[in-house]
Amino acid sequence: MDYFPVFLDLKKRRCLLVGGGEVATRKGRMLAKAGALLRVVAPDISAEIREIVAQQQGELHEREYQPSDMNDCVLAVAATDDDQLNKMISEHAQKRLIPVNVVDTPALCTYITPAIIDRSPLMIAVSSGGETPVLARLVRAKLETLIPTGYGKLAKIASQWRDRIKARFSEVIVVENFGKKFYKVLLRNS
């Protein structure tokens, strides 16, 4: 395993996004959806990023990146077409122990962003370790057809019953017989 899969809680936490184009917009959209407070730095910033930042009361800085832009950030994303700038952002973040993603340059990343299937609160991430992102997206697309959007509602309902279920059942055992799986539920003694 080349990477340790993890889901980060970014709600109301400052995240730096350097770049203002199409790729940065895509990354900004995902970070905002996760509840991150964006600090966006770029000489030119797309209208969509402007709207996202305004909605979530983030920060826009229409200028070149400065090392102080990392202050108070818990995550950094470099989404520019300037290789030297991306490398500098990666180095600055790593010195501060801030997880950093440099889009399409896994060698400069301390984390990579997987292809995501969002059935919130159920989340599924598919990654090729940055080696073949197209393959990861194809696998994601295949899984999306197999996992209905209603699973998100099911997960929300199940979460409401979680404590009661844990109190009632001691364990669930999967028994396989002739290639078919059966689930045996053991009740707790009352």
Image: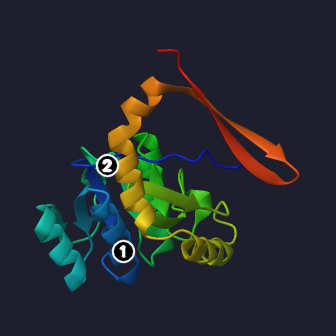
Furthest residue in direction top, as rendered = 190
**Does 116 appear above or below 22?**
above
Return the mark for residue 10. 2
Determine whether, in the image, residue 49 is placed left or right of residue 134.
left
> Under tag 1, what secondary structure?
helix
Residue 179 position, x and y percent, is: 85, 54
Q: What residue is at 36 percent from the left and 66 percent from the top?
A: 30
Determine whether, in the image, residue 159 is placed left or right of residue 64.
right
Task: Pick the residue in front: 45 or 131.
Answer: 131
Q: Quadrant of residue 146?
A: bottom right
Task: Pick the residue in front: 76 or 35.
Answer: 35
| Residue type beneath disc 1 | Ala
Residue 111 position, x and y percent, is: 53, 53
Residue 16 position, x and y percent, is: 30, 58
Residue tagged by mark 1? 24
Label 2–label 1 contact, CB within 8 A = no
Q: Quadrant of residue 55?
A: bottom left
Mark 2 and mark 1: Cα distance apart in space: 17 Å
**Does 11 appear above or below 19?**
above
Residue 44 position, x and y percent, is: 25, 82
Q: Tell me if residue 45 can be seen.
A: no
Task: Pick the residue in front: 103 or 123.
Answer: 123
Q: How dense is the environment of label 1, judged by Cα within 10 Å: few (below 14), some, or many (20 and up)? A: many
Furthest residue in direction front, as rendered = 190
**Does 103 appear above or below 43?**
above
| Residue type beneath disc 2 | Leu
Q: How dense is the environment of label 2, judged by Cα within 10 Å: few (below 14), some, or many (20 and up)? A: some
Q: Which colour scheme is used?
A: rainbow
Return the mark for residue 188. none
